[in-house]
Image (cartoon, helix red, strand yellow):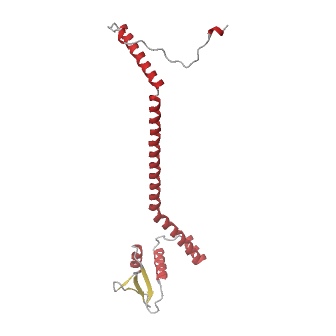
Amino acid sequence: MARLVKRYSNRKLYDTTESRYVTLEEIARWVRAGEDVKILENESGEDLTAVTFAQIILEGERKKSGLLSLGLMRELIQHGEAALQNIAATVDRGMEAIRSAPERAGRRVQELSRVADRLAELQRRVDEVVRRSVERVTGHPAFQQEVKRIERTVQALEARIGRLRGGDGDEDEVPPPAPAPTNRTPTNHANEG
């Protein structure tokens, strides 16, 4: 419920909550603190909240706080309510943008998290495809034969290196390398000529 302040004909302001007279500065402090304040004319009950707030702004200008620029005050006088509505709409949009910023940031973080999850799943699938492909290639008989041929060649080379170094390498231990398989078609030299 709003704090109720009554304005008497002598222009004094009476706070009904604290049962005492208050100043415009006190009302300004309440409003700045986020308190809802309502000012009523004591005899007629007319709502004087907007007029009182305007007075608070005017007092601030008198003290040269520079709250309102000369251009803005000129705009207010020239265009009256339309200028105020335009200012209020602009302020409302700004406040809404500020209020919705955490929500938008949270949504963005969630979107990025979903993208990261999808990328991790994609990486897992790629890894699995590569693993299966390597297994297929290494399990192929031609690949296994080639690996055995390379192993025999390496063993033969190691034995020869051992003999060249003066070691007692036994040639009979290491079988000679098998000829490399070729995929070329045999050439018939009889037809050349």
Describe residue 70's horizontal placement relative to residue 106 as left or right. Answer: right
Q: Quadrant of residue 38?
A: bottom left
The x and y percentages for residue 91 are: 51, 69
Q: Quadrant of residue 2?
A: bottom left
> Which residue is at 64% across, 8% downward?
190
Q: Quadrant of residue 153?
A: top left
Q: Closest to the observer: 138 or 11? A: 138
Name above or below for residue 193 compared with residue 72.
above
Describe residue 95's horizontal placement relative to residue 71 as left or right. Answer: left
Name above or below for residue 35 compared with residue 47.
above
The x and y percentages for residue 50 are: 49, 81
The x and y percentages for residue 100 are: 47, 64
Q: Closest to the observer: 173 or 2? A: 173
Q: From this viewpoint, which residue is outermost toward the right?
A: 193
> Which residue is at 48% across, 14% downward?
179
Name above or below for residue 167 compared with residue 54.
above
Q: Closest to the observer: 59 or 39? A: 39
> Which residue is at 43% across, 22% downward?
147
Describe residue 78's horizontal placement relative to residue 116 as left or right. Answer: right
Q: From this viewpoint, which residue is outermost toward the bottom?
A: 43
Q: Closest to the observer: 135 or 34? A: 135
Describe residue 95's horizontal placement relative to residue 21 as left or right. Answer: right
